[in-house]
Amino acid sequence: MEKIWLKRYPNGVPTEIDPDHYASLVDIFEESVKKYKDSPAFSNMDYEITYGELDTLTQQFAAYLQSLGLKPGDPVAVMMPNVLQYPVALFGILRAGMTVVNVNPLYTARELKHQLTDSKTKAIVILKNFAETLAKVEKDVNLDKVILTGIGDMLPVPKRWIVNFVVKYVKKMVPAYSLSNTIEFNDALSAGSKKPYSRPEIAGDDLAFLQYTGGTTGVSKGAMLTHRNMVANLDQISAFILPRLSDGKEVVITALPLYHIFALTANCLAFLKFGGKNILITNPRDMPAFVKELSKHKFTMISGVNTLFNGLLHTPGFKDIDFSHLKIALGGGMAVQRAVAENWEKVTGSALLEGYGLTECSPVVTANPFDIEHYTGSIGIPLPSTDVKIVDEDGKEVAQGETGEIWAKGPQVMAGYLGRKEDTDNAIKDGWFATGDMGLMDEHGFFRIVDRKKDMILVSGFNVYPNEIEDVVASHPKVLEVAAVGVEHESSGEVVKIVVVKKDQSLAEKELIDFCRENLTAYKVPKLVEFRDELPKTNVGKILRRELRDN
């Protein structure tokens, strides 16, 4: 297979990386906290901790976990939004040689029970706001310890007391719960400060993360991501954007949750390596507060999903922010729509670069080169040491420009799904990970996502891809958000339905259908239009097409 994309690598970007350059993520962490000791590492609610403080706190937390009798490799869950406790718990678990199990705080009791039992989690660090969910399944999961924390626990007194009081008693965001074997997060740190920390030997094949796939199609599966997988993807990302970075001077906006693999790798881990400062946004859905926070920082990088960028662009005050320091705006997680990308560039003066990744690939597979000046509509080119090909139903490579399933190969591809050999064998074939995404490659080696295999709509034998429909509808000036799904139809098999959130209340169904007729082939034109006040989304901001189909 000819890697024609290598000709498009910017100067200074290597074609290969060494995934064994570091033995583990802990090696990278220890190097950074020493090198950038006095620089700010993480900031939240106007309070920041330095790399030196992060070093001390994570060592205390690691020592505490070891004092519980937990062993290297034992799974420890983290169930929190973006607060300062997150990186302390995250790196503390890794420094103890244990495996991080990231948990979505919005999980239902059923989903939480599945993940904790499937992973055989030994302990959990959980925000008190979500402790009620854990209490419902505590008797069904075998936890040695529950470490509880309030949103303001890492803030200085008296701000800590004020924040926790408001959250619990004014906003009433902490439902009553009853749990056993608990300890407060700050008490755990205090206990750890009095215990010896034993630095374990960690090999590249040891598990760093059990990262559960969304579970939007069937049961959620634990992707086993090794230290080597994660180190490789960090090196791949950093090599790809290195010429744009200034050591110890980057300011990164982290609005996507750290429990999600995109923000975990692209924001938290990648910029830790370069001594960057991560601004943690606890609740990005509060757009006015988010914009106010952005206005305080000379940020150089921001990552997000299409709905997040779109939301910012429609929030008063965003256009008045100083974007002069912004180097990289990275979109992923779902397709970035052209209308959103072009509006972003117009407002910020910075191109919105789209990348592509999956939980099972740690996650980044492709990205647009940093020297691209405008939105391309593509997901870019493969990262160093990454191969990508487009195959047909039989796994045979298709001709350039033809649509097929995207397969990816590289050191970032997971070890497999925990306890699911059959699923692993179905997903990984001779080292190639079958993504389930439909795409194509152009003559320059740039890849384009057509859609998810399972989201494809079949109209009278023709393949219709929701992304294309959504891209067209989103370009209508009166549309704020849109999702396209297939609905059963007796004569054509399926027809296209669009669910739309209006930007302008004067928008009517006929106006939208006429617009689609001007821009789409007849069989792709939506036959059904539904207007809603909002679309169902995951906590990361991905639109849940399945939920729309089921309803």
Image: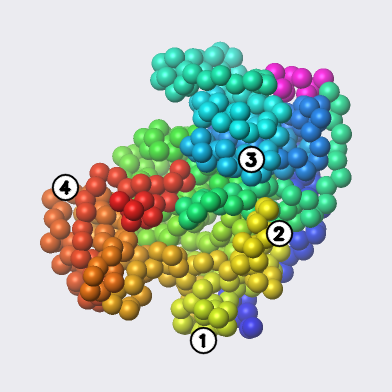
Q: Is residue 129 left or right of residue 122?
A: left
Q: Is residue 228 left or right of residue 311?
A: right
Q: CA distance from mark 4 to mark 3?
A: 47 Å
Dot label at residue 415 = 2
Dot label at residue 505 = 4
Residue 193 part of the magenta-drawn span: yes
Q: CA distance from mark 3 to mark 1?
A: 45 Å
Q: Position of residue 35 (x, y in %)?
A: 77, 42
Q: Secondary structure at mark 3?
A: helix
Label 1 sits on what residue type?
Answer: Ala
Label 2 sits on what residue type?
Answer: Ala
Q: Secondary structure at mark 1?
A: loop
Q: Secondary structure at mark 2?
A: loop
Q: Earlier in the sequence, mark 2 or mark 1?
A: 1
Q: Position of residue 254 (x, y in %)?
A: 53, 42
Q: Which residues are magenta?
A: 186-194
What predominant SS class does the magenta segment belong to? helix
Q: Quadrant of the N terminus?
A: bottom right
Label 1: few (<14), some (14–19) or many (≥20) C-alpha neighbours in 10 Å? few
Label 4: few (<14), some (14–19) or many (≥20) C-alpha neighbours in 10 Å? few
Dot label at residue 399 = 1
Compare residues 350 and 60 and report the one nearer the observer: 60
Dot label at residue 117 = 3
Q: Residue at x 43, y 70 (%)?
A: 450
Q: Earlier in the sequence, mark 4 or mark 1?
A: 1
Q: Residue at x 25, y 74 (%)?
A: 492
Q: CA distance from mark 3 to mark 2?
A: 20 Å
Residue 362, image quadrant: bottom right
Q: CA distance from mark 4 to mark 2?
A: 50 Å
Residue 34, image quadrant: top right
Q: Are marks 4 and 2 in contact (CB under 8 Å)?
A: no
Label 2: few (<14), some (14–19) or many (≥20) C-alpha neighbours in 10 Å? many
